[in-house]
Amino acid sequence: MSHQLLSIRGLGLLPWLLFAALSVSADEPAIKRVAALTTVYRHNSHADVIISRLLLTDMLDGTGKDSLLKLVSLYTDQRPPNDISRLLAASHRFPIYPTIADTLTLGTGRLAVDGVLLVAEHGDYPRSPTGNTQYPKRRFWDEMIKVFRASGRVVPVFVDKHLADNWADAKHIYDTARELNIPLMGGSSVPGSWRHPAADIEREARVDEIVVLTFGSTDHYGFHALECLQAVAEQRRGGETGVRAVRCLTGDAVWAAQREKRFDPTLFEAAMNRLSRRPSEGRPLREAVNEPILWQVEYLDGLRATVLELNGAVSEWTGAWRYRNDRRIESTQFWTQEARPAAHFTLLLNGVEKMMLTGQPGRNVERTLMTSGLLDALLQSRTEGGARKETPHLQFSYQPIWRWQQPPPPPASRPWGEQ
């Protein structure tokens, strides 16, 4: 792994199981012992849909493919009434330790695991002044680093979703990983999941504009939208060149931006057409959407991107982009399995397993750094009344090492309430 920024500026279950099995080559080690650090561990939490795959197979019910990672220890920062970690620990015979240090050393005082899963996504934590949930990722990270330094060795680390809720902490995590040569991977499960139809920006093509639609809570699901944006944007000619400025508009300012065509109406319509559930025909969009939010991203190479949160009309992630040379438009829906076993997390875990086994991340942590910084800057713009914010800290470049491919069809869905 390169730990430096390149510049400072229906077919049934069988094909699914084969796809998962082929994600790791036969000559790789059979098992790696990992520790998991999490905020809360309840049914359908990120801890459950990621870490439980090491215990209950990728189907989360014991009927699927076993992971090549073995969970040997767990730390939970909070224990809500619906916690399931203690039941799992008793039935699968792994210890839950009271400290991060003991979780990584298994109580021996020295690092005793082959990898770390840092999953901090749910729980009772405060909000920042910009509205971002302040998960204790930096605290988890710094306590882990103390063990690495004291032990004189490091192991691969996966950080679920953003590196941190603010730029200073995200950059701290990134810089520490570079300093210590820690194989590090982070990010969302959504960009690598299914796309309907299968579409991606052609490698090395010139693209003028991208429009992405999103929904849900602005900080949580907005990060997914930014990862979808960045996963396609980084494929353009030159790779990622960096971001010059961002801006967040809300309410009537969003509808004014639409009237003034500050984002391409044809791309917007193409993205809307990829929704499987479109708003009622003939009903004005602004009647369906009470609190629209618009994010604008200006890239250094001239690419413009718009992310629109349209709760009330949109409940999926979609995107559209226009090629510069022939003005051609492509669009897609970023589809996730919104039911058990939430198989998009299997796709994510496949990449994590490969990094733990080989020590080589399969996608750039710089993408996660970029999206973490974008989310922070956009939320700052919102608190400042929609001010355009220059982002010199995001003017870095990287070449993508990852390329999306369409997975085989997902396994059958089960209700969220089932195991």
Image: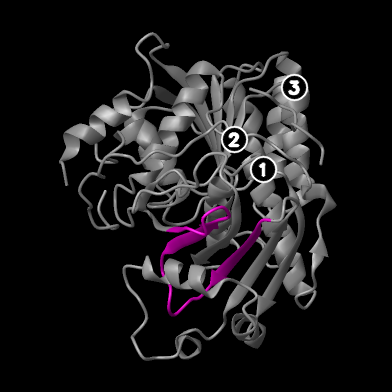
Front-most of 124 and 262? 262
Mark 1 surroundings within 10 Å by alpha-carbon count, few (fewer than 14), some (14 through 19), many (20 or more):
many
| On screen, residue 183 above or below 57 | above
* Left or right of residue 277: residue 288: right
Residue 180: which numbered mark, if any? 3
Please name the amino acid that badge 2 sits on. Pro
The CA distance from mark 1 to mark 3 is: 25 Å
Residue 240: which numbered mark, if any? 1
Residue 283 occupies quadrant: bottom left
Q: Which secondary structure, mark 2?
A: loop
> Does the magenta portion include 144?
no
Q: Position of residue 85 (x, y in %)?
A: 43, 42
Q: Which secondary structure, mark 3?
A: helix
Please tell me whether mark 2 or mark 3 is closer to you in this view.
2
Q: Earlier in the sequence, mark 1 or mark 2?
A: 1
> Does the magenta portion include 312?
yes
Q: Position of residue 73 (x, y in %)?
A: 50, 28
Please name the amino acid that badge 1 sits on. Glu
- In this picture, which residue range is highlighted in magenta? 303-330
The reply to whether discs 1 and 2 touch (Cβ–Cβ < 8 Å) is yes
Q: Position of residue 287 (x, y in %)?
A: 47, 91
List the residue tagged with mark 2: 400
The CA distance from mark 2 to mark 3 is: 22 Å
The CA distance from mark 1 to mark 2 is: 8 Å
Residue located at (65% from left, 16% from top): 110
